[in-house]
Image: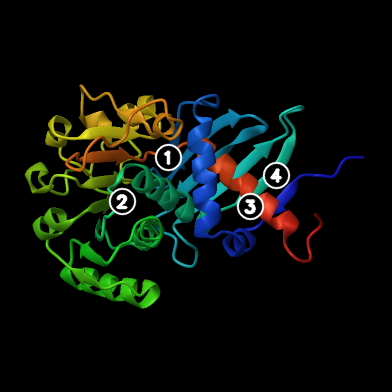
Amino acid sequence: MSAGPVFISEAESAALVDDELALAAAREAFLATATGSTFPVVIGHSSSPHNRFTLKSGSAGDLVGVKVGSFWPDNAELPRHSSTIVLLDPATGRLSAVVEAAAANAYRTAAADALAVDTLARADSRTLTVIGTGHQALHEVRAVSRVRPIGRVLVVGRRPDAARAFAAEVTSLTGLPAAPADARTGVAAADVLVTATTAREPLFEASWVAPGTHISAMGADGPGKQELPVELHDRASLFCDLPEQSCAIGEFQHFPSAVPVALGAVLAGAADGRTSREDVTVFDSSGFALQDLTLAAALLRRRATSPGEPA
C-alpha cells in the first residue's frame, strides 16, 4: 500500500524555509513558465466580504496543484494572512501533499522580486529604497540585499513614526544602514526601488525616477490595486511574471498599451533584459502558482533530507 499524503505544518515550513531555498525555487518556477501551465486566478470571499481568498493553480512537469491564499483582516490571535499549497499526484490526481506556508509565502514573494533585481538591476546597485513598512517589506530588503551590494536602505512610509521604526528594525536585523525618507527623495536616490504596499493609486511620480533605476513592484495582485504611475510606460522597459495575468490583475492593468516581457523569457535567454546602464526597468510581480508548487516541492525535499527525517 502506498504512503498517504504528506503534511507540512506552518511551524515546520517556517523552520525549513530560508532565502536560498526560496530564490532557487523562484528561479525554477520562472524558467518553468516556458513549458508549464497556469490558470486564471479565482478570487473569492467568505460570507463576510472583507474576508478574502484567492486560488492560483498550475502544473509543470511532475508538479500539479493549487495555492489558497487568504486574508482575514479581523484576526487577532492568528495572522491575518495564510497560505496553503495542495499538491496532486500527477499520475492519479489524488492528494499528494498539503503544505501550510504563510511564513514561507513571504520568502517566496520576496524571492521573485530579488530574482528580478538579480536579472535586471545594475550590478553595482547600492541604494535600495523600499516603499512600505509592513511585514513583507522586511523580507524584500533582506532578499534584495543578498543579490546586490546594497550599502544603504531608504524607507518610505505613510507615517513618519512607522518609517523610523522600520528603518531601525532593518538595521537591527540586517546590519545595513537604514533611514526614513520622503517619497521624492527615496525614489530619486534609488538604484533599486521596491514597492510593498496595498495601494490603489500611484505611490510616486514617474519624473522622480532616475535613469538606471530598477523597480520591483509586488503590491498589485487584484483588480484596482496600483503602485506605479502609468507615465513610466513611456520611459521604462517593462517586465513581469505572467504577461496575461499582469495585464488583468497586476500592475499593468493600468497600462492599457503595455506589452510586458516575461521574466522567465529573459532568464532563458529568449528575450533581452537591461540593455544599458541608463535603462529604467520595471518588474511587476502579481504572483503565480508555479512559484508555490516549486516552493512546496523544495520544502518537501529539504524535509526529507533533514536530520531525523527519512531520505
Give percent across and percent down for residue 32. 53, 31
Q: Are marks 1 and 4 in contact (CB under 8 Å)?
A: no
Picture residue at 26% right of the left edge, 73% below the top? 177
**Residue displayed at 21% across by 31% down:** 254
- Residues at marks 1 and 3 touching, judged by CB atoms closer than 8 Å: no
Compared to residue 40, the image places residue 285 above or below, namely below
How far apart are the alpha carbons under marks 2 and 1? 25 Å
Amino acid type at image mark 2: Ala
Count residues near mark 1 (Cα–Cα under 10 Å), then give few for <14, some for 14-19, many for 20+.
Answer: many
Q: CA distance from mark 1 to mark 4?
A: 21 Å
Q: CA distance from mark 2 to mark 3?
A: 30 Å
Residue at the (64%, 62%) spot, across then down: 12
Q: Is residue 225 visible?
A: no
Q: Which residue is mark 2?
A: 123
Q: Circle 4 is placed at which residue position? A: 97
Label 4's element? strand
Describe the element under mark 1 as helix, strand or loop. Answer: loop
| Residue bearing the label numbered 1 | 287
Front label number (2 vs 4): 2
